[in-house]
Image (cartoon, rainbow, N blue to C red):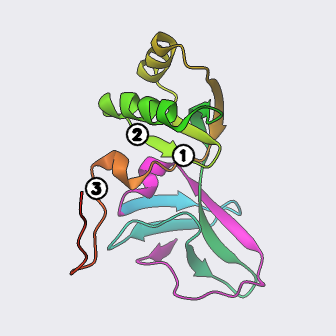
Amino acid sequence: MQLVSAPLPTSAAHLPEVAIRTDRLTLAKRLWRGRAEDGTEFGFELAAPLRPGDVVFQSPTARYVVRQAEEPVVEISLEMPPSAAAGIGWAIGNLHLELCAEPTRLLAADEPAVRQLLDRLKVSYRTTTAVFRPGRFSRGQLPVHDVGTSHKH
């Protein structure tokens, strides 16, 4: 088993990639085990969680890259006025559920509460699978402003 304490600072981009696939909840952890697509086993003891795309090990013939697995999601097309999209985002957030905003769609975990909410609001959606990376605001983190920057309202 290969032990990993941090992503590699650099890697040989010309080497073929071998994926270590994991779900987003495992990816958020600092202690976990995983297996690459070629069967190589890894133990992770990290100071900070890894991010999708991090290279964690390299051999003479391959580089091992963490890839987040797809999961069931509800997809809402953003072919609507911005105010409607904002209202949908607020409604999902008001249920304390996470949301991912992309340029053409909103994604939420495919949970009964999300479906019930969207049905009640008469919002069209479809179920699919996708890599779900909720935004930092969905977990209550606020943006950090540079010191000395003032904002007038």
Query: Magenta span covers which residues?
Result: 1-30
Q: Residue at x 78, y 76 (%)?
A: 16
Element class at badge 2: loop
Q: Earlier in the sequence, mark 3 or mark 2?
A: 2
- Check whether the beta carbons of the residues at disc 3 and disc 2 lie within 8 A of each other: no
Q: Pointer 2 and pointer 1: residues touching (CB < 8 Å)?
A: yes
Asked if one can make out residue 36 in the rendered structure from this viewpoint, the answer is yes
Q: Check contact, mark 3 vs mark 1: CB within 8 A.
A: no
The 10 Å Cα crowd at callout 1, few under 14, some 14 to 19, many 20 or more, is many
Check if residue 41 falls in the magenta segment.
no
Label 3 amino acid? Gln
- Residue at image coords 46%, 48%: 134
Q: Which mark is residue 132?
A: 1
* For residue 64, above or below residue 28: below
Badge number at residue 141 = 3
Dot 2 crowding, Cα within 10 Å, few <14, some 14–19, many 20+:
many
Pinpoint residue 59: horizontal percent, then vertical percent: 67, 84
Can I make out residue 109 in this image?
A: no
The amino acid sitting under disc 1 is: Phe
The residue tagged 2 is 98
The three-letter amino acid code for the residue at tag 2 is Glu
